[in-house]
């Protein structure tokens, strides 16, 4: 293995410093919004892209909380209606009557989240809120109500800080853009 983690990255779109600053703001906002709740907040990360963001975010939330994970996989690149989302790993927690905060790396078309929000909503939680590190609003195909957004970004494929290309780059400390040759 001769390559460095930054191999093929042409640009830093969101620096480590910017991410750190935004994490504090999001953590304060979430703390404020849930501080009067009696039950611990259940923070649900969508595997695997959200784990870096989630690990940093939960340490900025000054409240008792639990963590849990869901893994979904999207199938078929065809038309909007044929898009299918399969749950590969479900929650361990019972969320009935609880406040749930779903943490995602990036919202693109919105299909993955739509499906997960429907699933969680069917289990009688008190409320399901959504926090995403990145949002690509131009790409949205289904409407989704997002309470906490780290950064809105243009329609470019990004990697790092949890996001991958072919499972690589998740451990970059910033969000970057790879050179076209990487995708060939
Ligand atoms: P959606 O169902 O189209 O919203 O898909 C969202 C998922 O696609 C994210 O959780 C990512 O795993 C992946 N994704 C979308 N855009 C990017 C990107 O720019 N870089 C890396 N992964 C992405
Ligand atoms: Mg993902």
Image (cartoon, helix red, strand yellow):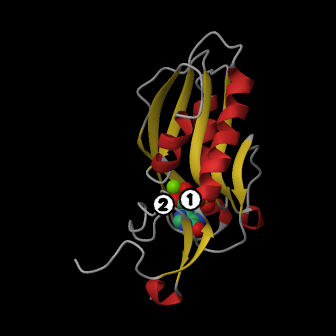
**Frontmost residue, 162 versus 166:** 162
Residue positioned most to the left: 1
Residue 42 numbered mark, or none: none
Among the two numbered marks 1 and 2 on one chain, the one whose residue lies closer to the N terminus: 1
- What residue did someone put label 2 on? 173
Q: Is residue 114 visible?
A: no
Give coordinates of residue 85: x percent, y percent: 52, 52
Looking at the image, is 89 positioned above or below residue 18? above
Looking at the image, is 87 positioned above or below residue 184? above
| The N terminus sits in image quarter | bottom left
- What residue did someone put label 1 on? 16
**Frontmost residue, 97 versus 19:** 19
Q: Are marks 1 and 2 in contact (CB under 8 Å)?
A: yes
Task: Specify few, some or many for label 1: CA neighbours under 10 Å numbering under 14, 14-19, or 20 or more.
Answer: some
Residue positioned most to the front: 17
Q: Secondary structure at mark 1?
A: helix
Give coordinates of residue 130: x percent, y percent: 67, 39
> Mark 1 near ligand 1 (CB under 8 Å)?
no
Give the residue drawn at x 53%, y 88%: 180
Q: Is residue 137 visible?
A: yes
Q: CA distance from mark 1 to mark 2?
A: 6 Å
């Amino acid at each position: 293995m001769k390559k460095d983690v930054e191999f093929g990255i042409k640009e830093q779109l969101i620096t480590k410093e910017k991410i750190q600053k935004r994490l504090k703001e999001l953590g304060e906002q979430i703390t404020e919004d849930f501080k009067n709740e009696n039950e611990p907040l259940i923070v649900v990360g969508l595997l695997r892209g959200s784990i870096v963001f989630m690990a940093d975010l939960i340490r900025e939330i000054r409240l008792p909380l639990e963590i849990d994970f869901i893994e979904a996989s999207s199938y078929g690149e065809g038309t909007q209606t044929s898009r299918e989302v399969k749950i590969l790993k479900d929650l361990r927690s019972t969320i009935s009557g609880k406040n749930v905060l779903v943490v995602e790396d990036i919202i693109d078309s919105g299909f993955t989240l739509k499906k997960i929000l429907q699933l969680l909503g069917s289990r009688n939680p008190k409320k399901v809120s959504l926090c995403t590190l990145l949002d690509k609003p131009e790409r949205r195909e289904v409407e989704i109500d997002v309470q906490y957004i780290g950064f809105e970004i243009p329609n470019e494929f990004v990697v790092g800080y949890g996001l991958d290309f072919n499972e690589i780059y998740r451990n970059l400390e910033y969000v970057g853009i790879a050179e076209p040759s990487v995708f060939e």
